[in-house]
Image (spheres, helix red, strand yellow):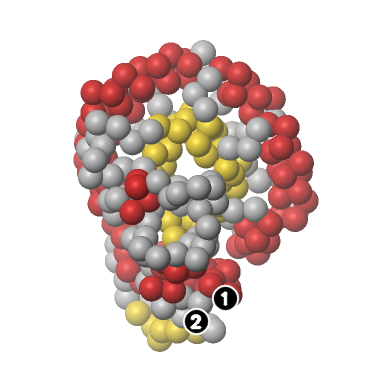
Amino acid sequence: MKIGVSTFVTDQGIGPAPLGRALEERGFDSLFIAEHTHIPASRRTPYPGGGELPEIYYRTLDPYIVLTAVAAVTERLLLGTGIALVAQRDPIIMAKEVASLDLVSGGRVIVGIGAGWNREEMENHGTDPATRGRLVNERLQAMRELWTQEKAEFHGEFVNFDPVYLWPKPVQRPYPPIYVGGVEAAFTRIAALGSDAWLANASSPEQLAPLIERMRSVAGRDVPVTVYAVPPTPEAVEGYERLGVERVLFYLPTLPEGETLGQLDTMAQVAARFR
């Protein structure tokens, strides 16, 4: 069982460099960080967790800047987005950011992606919520072309460019692994794009088991599963281990450095039982 950490990195919590060092020193395998470019002050879209939207959602740092800072002070830690909002990102710029991070980190990037839930947020980026699924699929396909072809071109419904040069190319070939977040639409995306893993939210093992079966049925293959925001308890890990989940990501609250290090010490004691 692989065990990593998922968190929101903001201007109010531990900094990226000390967080990265602390995770690697304690033997965690990966860091997955959340992304929101901004949060509209007035929203019609309800927060999926219920109640008021936590402040961390609109204080997140840019994920690729955070992960670059983490890469600079670590050697083994995998660097993931959990999740990058592809519907809000230019695919040419994102392709360059991902490939650049993969290069400077020595091939440690995991591209966790999703279509997003906040309709007003994506509308501010010029994205129509009704077509965001198709948009995400095209942008991923276009990025794959940019990562793998010396002269890449793409002509689709939403993405269109004639042959271009884009470097660097990722260290990982043909490109970094792509983990897809979401539920039913994500299952179709995994099947259509041949994605490397499903990034699942931390439903209980009992709730997650039929979803894994459904996802693999849609995908037509034994897709690995990483579970996001898992409580750092032995019981939780054991439940997901029985399901054959590849990796769990303990949820790390966004706190100042001293408090964060204490939380990580406790989490590391749990993780050590499963190595």
Q: Which residue lies under the disc numbered 2?
A: 158
Rounded to the nearest whole Å, what is the CA distance between mark 1 and mark 2? 10 Å
Cβ atoms under marks 1 and 2 closer than 8 Å: yes
Residue located 34% across and 33% down the image: 76
Q: Position of residue 30 (x, y in %)?
A: 41, 35
Q: Is residue 102 left or right of residue 130?
A: left
Residue located 36% across and 43% down the image: 8
Along the viewing direction, whichever of 181 and 138 lies nearer the viewer: 181
Q: Secondary structure at mark 2?
A: loop
**Location of the N terminus (image quadrant):** top right
Mark 1: which amino acid?
Answer: Thr
Residue 140 visible at all? no
Residue located 66% across and 24% down the image: 239
Q: Position of residue 180 (x, y in %)?
A: 55, 53
Q: Position of residue 265 (x, y in %)?
A: 35, 17
Query: Which of disc 2 and disc 1 is earlier in sequence?
Result: 1
Q: Which residue lies under the disc numbered 1?
A: 131
Q: Is residue 7 left or right of residue 238?
A: left
